[in-house]
Image (tube, coloured by chain):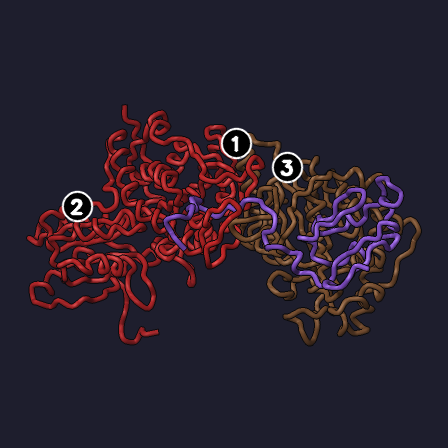
Chain colours: A purple, B red, C brown
C-alpha cells in the first residue's frame, strides 16, 4: 500500500460512522432465501396496506413495507422468520442455488 | 492583593477545583480524601459552585461518570486514594484510551493488604502505565496551583491528569496558601472543547472494538488499527513535556509562582550528592540537603514533579554534576526496585553519567520520614563514595529487615 | 393489531448488514426500541452482543449515537451522560443504558442499583438472552435452572434464574416494564411511554437466542410467544407502583389460561438434559409467580 496516498485517520478516539454493510454483504450468509408468492400475500393480492407482519418481524429491517412487498437480498440473512410468521403462508424458504419455481 | 489562608491540602484542593469550575463532579469517600469530597458537596449544595455532583456508589463508577460526562462536553473532576484508585484501575486505562481530559486528585495512601490508612505512594505509582499524566505536589500551595494547570494541560493534549499529594502529610496538614484570583483563573483556563462529542446531531459509535489491522471506511479514509490508536496516545505523551513546561511558565507569568515544570531543582548547580523523590518526601530532602551542606557535603535535590511522562532529559540534566544519587520513594515495583529508581537509571543510560544509585524505600504505610534520617542515608552514600564503594544498593529506611524476616 | 402496526415509526435506525446472528431476538427488539425512542437519544452499552451489532471500527450500522463502556459500568456511564447533559442544559435528549443479562444481573448490578437509587434520569434496558451469549453462551445468573451452557455443559445449571425484575421493583421506580420481540407493538408502545417519563425507568426485554438456546433461527418469534403463553415470561408494566398486565399476558390473565412450560422448554436444545425434578420446580415457580401477579393486578 502506498502510505503517502492514503487519507489519514485523524480521530484521537475510535469513532464509527454509520453505513450499510458493516459486516459486509450479509446476504452471503444465507443457505435459504425467502420467496414471496404475491398471489397469496395479503397486501399484494388485495392491493392495499394490510398485514405486513413480515416487515414487523424481520430482525434486519430488510423487508420493505411496499406493494408488492420487497426484500433486500443483498442483506437478508435468510433466518426464515418472515416465512414462519406469514399468516397466509405466502413466503417459502428456497435453498440458495435452486430455482424459485 | 494576595489572599493567603491557612489551609489543609484537601481544603486547598477543593478551592482549586472550585476555581476551575467543573461541570460534573463524582466522588466516593475514602480516607484521606473524604474531606475533599465533603467540601465540594458543601460548595455545590451551598450554591458556591455550579456543578452536577454525582454521589456515586463506588470509585469505579466515579471515574466512569467523569468519562461519560466528559464525552458529552462537560469538564469533570474526581478524587480518590489507595484501594479506591485500585478499584477504578480499569477505568484509568479507559479514560486515557478515550483521550478524555479528566482531572483527578489522588490523595496518596498505602494499599491493602494489609490495610493502611496512612500515606505512601504505592497507589498512584502502580498506575504509571495507564497513560495518565502524573504530577506530584510538594506542598499545599502546589496542590491548588497544579490543579489549575492540570486542566490546562489535560484539555490541550486530551490526556487525563492525576494530581497526587500525600495523604495526611499534606491532605490534613495546614499550611499558608495564596489563593489565585478567580477572574485570573478564568482568563488562564479557556473553556473545555471536546474532540469528540456524543450527540444526536452527529451520531457516532464511540470506542467500539478495533481490529488488529487498519481498515478503510466508506469515505476512503484508512482508519487506525488498535496499535495506531494507542500510538497516538504515546505520541501525545511525548508532546506533553512541552505542554507541561508551558503550563508551568504561563502560570508563573500570571500568578507569580514557578513550580519547576517537570523537574524542580534545589541547590543542584554544584551538588555532588543528589537526592531525588516525588511529593512531600522530596521537600523533606531539601531540609536534609541543608543539614548535609552544613557538614560540608555538597548535597542537592532533583525533585520529580512530573512522573509521567517521565522527564528523561530534564532528570539527566539535573543530575549532570552528581557523583552519587539517593532516590527516595514511598513505593516500589515488587520483585525489582523502587519505581523512580528504575526510571532515573534508565534516564541516565546512554549518557556519560555512571554513578552509584542508592534505592531507598521509605515511609510505607505512613511510617514517618525525618529529615535527619534522609540526611543519614545521604551521609552513608557519601562515605561509600569517598571509600570507593560504587555499587548500587537498596535500603529500606528505618525498617526492620533482618535475616529472620525473609517472609 | 393492524392499526397499531401502522402507528409504528417507519424510520429504520439499524442499517442493513449488521454483525448479529440470523434470527437474533435482540436485533428485532432493538429495531423497534429505536423506532420508539427516535433521534434525540444517546445510548451507552458495554461489551455484549449489542456492542458487536453496533459494529467494529470505523463503521457502525446504527444511526443513533452510542458510547461504549466497560462491563461493570453501564449504569454509571449513563449517570455520567445524564449529569453532563444536565450541567450543560441539554435536557431534551433521552439517555439510555442498554446491557445484556450478564452485565446487568451480574457485574453491573451495583452501578444500576446506585443509579436507580439516585433517581438518575435515564432508561435502563436489560436484554435478557439468559446467558453470556456474546462470549460463547456461558451461564449467567439469568440462565434458567436445567439449561445447558458452555460452563454448565454436563450437569446443567443447578441454580434458579435470578428474579431480577423483582429486584428492580424494589427500587420504587416511576416506570418498569417487561417486553418481548415476539410482541413488537407492545414493546414499541412501552418504549414510547417510557421516553415521556422522568427518572429511572427499567425495561426488560426477553430475547430468544437461536444459537444459545439451541433452536432454529426461524423460530425466534414463535419461541418468544411460547415464553409468554406458558407464563415463563409475563408482559406487564408498573407505573408509579400500579401493576398492569399488558398484551398477550393481559388476555391470558382475563381468560385464566396458561400453557404448561413443557411446551416451551421441550422445543429448546439447551433443556434436553433438564431433569423431571427441575421441570417440576420450574413449573411450580412459574405458577406461583403468575398467581402473585394476578393478585398484584387486582390491586
Tell me the subunit letter for badge 3.
Answer: C
Q: Which quadrant of the view contains residue B398?
A: bottom left
Query: Could you say which is closer to the camera, residue A62 or residue B382?
Result: A62
Label 2: element kind = strand
Query: Could you say which is closer to the camera, residue B252 or residue B54?
Result: B252
Q: Which quadrant of the view contains residue A47?
A: top right
Label 3: element kind = loop
Residue C39 is labelled as 3
Q: Mark 3 or 2, which is nearer the eye?
A: 3
Residue B46 x, y percent position in the rendering = 49, 29
As displayed, is residue C19 above or below residue A70? below
Left or right of B168? Residue B328 is left
Q: Residues within 10 Å of mark 1 (few under 14, many from 20)?
A: some
Residue B321 x, y percent position in the rendering = 11, 53
Tell me the subunit letter for badge 1.
Answer: C
Residue C88 is labelled as 1
Q: Mark 2 or 1, which is nearer the eye?
A: 1
Amino acid at each position: 500500500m502506498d502510505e503517502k496516498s492514503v487519507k489519514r485517520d485523524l480521530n484521537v478516539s475510535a469513532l464509527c460512522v454509520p453505513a450499510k454493510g458493516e459486516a459486509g454483504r450479509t446476504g452471503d450468509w444465507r443457505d435459504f432465501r425467502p420467496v414471496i408468492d404475491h398471489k397469496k400475500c395479503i397486501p399484494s393480492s388485495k392491493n392495499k396496506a394490510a398485514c405486513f407482519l413480515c416487515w414487523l418481524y424481520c430482525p434486519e429491517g430488510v423487508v420493505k413495507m411496499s406493494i408488492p412487498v420487497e426484500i433486500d437480498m443483498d442483506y437478508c440473512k435468510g433466518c426464515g422468520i418472515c416465512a414462519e410468521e406469514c399468516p397466509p403462508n405466502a413466503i417459502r424458504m428456497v435453498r440458495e442455488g435452486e430455482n424459485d419455481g | 492583593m494576595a489572599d493567603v489562608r491557612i489551609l489543609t491540602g484537601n481544603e486547598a484542593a477543593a478551592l482549586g477545583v472550585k476555581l476551575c469550575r467543573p461541570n460534573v463532579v463524582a466522588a466516593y469517600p475514602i480516607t484521606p480524601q473524604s474531606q475533599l469530597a465533603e467540601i465540594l458537596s458543601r460548595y455545590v449544595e451551598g450554591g458556591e459552585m455550579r456543578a452536577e455532583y454525582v454521589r456515586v456508589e463506588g470509585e469505579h463508577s466515579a471515574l466512569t461518570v467523569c468519562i461519560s460526562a466528559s464525552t458529552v462536553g462537560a469538564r469533570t473532576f474526581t478524587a480518590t486514594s489507595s484501594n479506591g484508585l485500585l478499584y477504578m484501575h480499569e477505568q484509568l486505562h479507559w479514560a486515557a484510551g478515550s483521550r478524555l481530559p479528566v482531572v483527578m486528585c489522588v490523595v496518596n495512601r498505602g494499599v491493602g493488604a494489609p490495610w493502611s490508612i496512612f500515606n505512601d505512594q504505592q497507589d498512584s505509582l502502580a498506575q504509571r502505565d495507564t497513560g495518565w499524566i502524573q504530577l506530584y505536589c510538594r506542598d499545599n500551595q502546589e496542590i491548588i496551583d497544579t490543579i489549575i494547570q492540570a486542566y490546562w494541560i489535560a484539555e490541550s493534549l486530551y490526556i487525563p491528569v492525576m494530581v497526587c499529594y500525600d495523604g495526611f502529610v499534606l491532605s490534613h496538614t495546614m499550611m499558608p496558601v495564596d489563593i489565585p484570583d478567580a477572574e485570573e483563573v478564568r482568563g488562564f483556563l479557556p473553556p473545555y472543547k471536546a474532540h469528540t462529542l456524543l450527540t444526536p446531531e452527529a451520531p457516532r459509535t464511540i470506542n467500539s472494538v478495533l481490529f488488529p489491522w487498519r481498515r478503510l471506511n466508506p469515505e476512503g479514509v484508512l482508519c487506525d488499527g488498535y496499535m495506531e490508536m494507542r500510538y497516538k496516545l504515546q505520541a501525545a505523551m511525548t508532546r506533553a513535556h512541552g505542554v507541561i513546561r508551558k503550563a508551568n511558565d504561563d502560570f508563573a507569568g500570571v500568578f507569580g509562582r514557578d513550580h519547576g515544570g517537570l523537574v524542580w531543582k534545589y541547590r543542584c548547580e554544584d551538588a555532588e550528592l543528589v537526592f531525588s523523590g516525588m511529593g512531600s518526601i522530596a521537600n523533606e530532602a531539601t531540609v536534609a540537603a541543608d543539614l548535609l551542606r552544613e557538614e560540608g557535603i555538597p548535597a542537592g535535590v532533583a525533585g520529580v514533579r512530573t512522573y509521567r511522562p517521565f522527564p528523561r532529559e530534564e532528570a539527566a540534566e539535573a543530575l549532570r554534576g552528581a557523583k552519587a544519587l539517593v532516590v527516595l520513594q514511598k513505593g516500589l515495583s515488587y520483585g525489582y526496585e523502587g519505581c523512580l529508581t528504575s526510571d532515573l537509571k534508565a534516564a541516565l543510560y546512554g549518557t556519560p553519567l555512571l554513578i552509584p544509585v542508592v534505592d531507598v524505600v521509605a515511609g510505607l504505610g505512613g511510617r514517618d520520614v525525618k529529615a535527619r534520617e534522609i540526611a543519614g542515608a545521604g551521609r552513608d552514600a557519601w562515605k561509600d563514595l569517598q571509600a570507593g564503594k560504587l555499587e548500587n544498593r537498596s535500603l529500606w529506611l528505618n525498617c526492620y529487615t533482618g535475616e529472620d524476616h525473609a517472609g | 393489531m393492524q392499526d397499531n402496526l401502522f402507528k409504528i415509526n417507519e424510520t429504520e435506525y439499524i442499517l442493513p448488514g449488521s454483525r448479529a446472528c440470523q434470527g437474533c431476538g435482540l436485533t428485532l427488539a432493538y429495531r423497534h426500541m429505536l423506532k420508539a425512542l427516535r433521534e434525540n437519544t444517546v445510548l451507552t452499552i458495554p461489551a455484549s452482543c449489542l456492542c458487536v451489532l453496533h459494529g467494529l471500527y470505523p463503521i457502525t450500522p446504527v444511526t443513533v449515537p452510542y458510547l461504549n463502556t466497560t462491563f461493570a459500568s453501564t449504569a454509571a456511564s449513563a449517570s455520567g451522560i445524564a449529569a453532563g447533559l444536565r450541567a450543560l442544559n441539554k435536557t431534551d435528549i433521552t439517555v439510555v443504558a442498554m446491557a445484556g443479562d450478564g452485565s446487568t444481573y451480574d457485574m453491573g448490578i451495583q452501578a444500576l442499583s446506585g443509579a436507580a437509587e439516585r433517581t438518575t434520569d435515564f432508561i435502563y434496558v436489560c436484554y435478557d438472552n439468559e446467558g453470556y451469549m456474546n462470549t460463547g453462551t456461558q451461564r449467567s445468573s439469568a440462565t434458567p435452572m436445567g439449561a445447558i451452557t458452555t460452563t454448565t455443559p454436563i450437569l446443567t445449571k443447578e441454580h434458579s434464574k435470578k428474579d431480577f425484575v423483582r429486584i428492580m421493583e424494589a427500587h420504587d421506580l416511576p416506570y418498569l416494564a417487561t417486553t418481548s420481540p415476539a410482541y413488537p407493538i407492545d414493546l414499541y408502545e412501552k418504549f414510547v411511554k417510557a421516553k415521556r417519563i422522568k427518572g429511572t425507568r427499567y425495561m426488560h426485554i426477553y430475547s430468544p437466542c437461536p444459537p444459545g438456546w439451541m433452536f432454529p433461527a426461524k423460530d425466534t418469534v414463535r419461541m418468544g410467544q411460547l415464553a409468554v403463553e406458558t407464563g415463563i415470561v409475563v408482559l406487564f408494566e408498573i407505573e408509579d407502583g400500579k401493576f398492569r398486565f399488558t398484551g398477550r399476558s393481559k388476555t391470558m390473565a382475563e381468560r385464566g389460561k396458561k400453557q404448561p412450560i413443557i411446551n416451551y422448554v421441550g422445543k429448546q436444545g439447551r433443556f434436553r438434559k433438564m431433569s423431571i425434578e427441575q421441570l417440576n420446580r420450574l413449573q411450580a415457580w412459574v405458577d406461583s409467580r403468575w398467581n402473585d401477579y394476578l393478585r398484584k393486578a387486582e390491586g
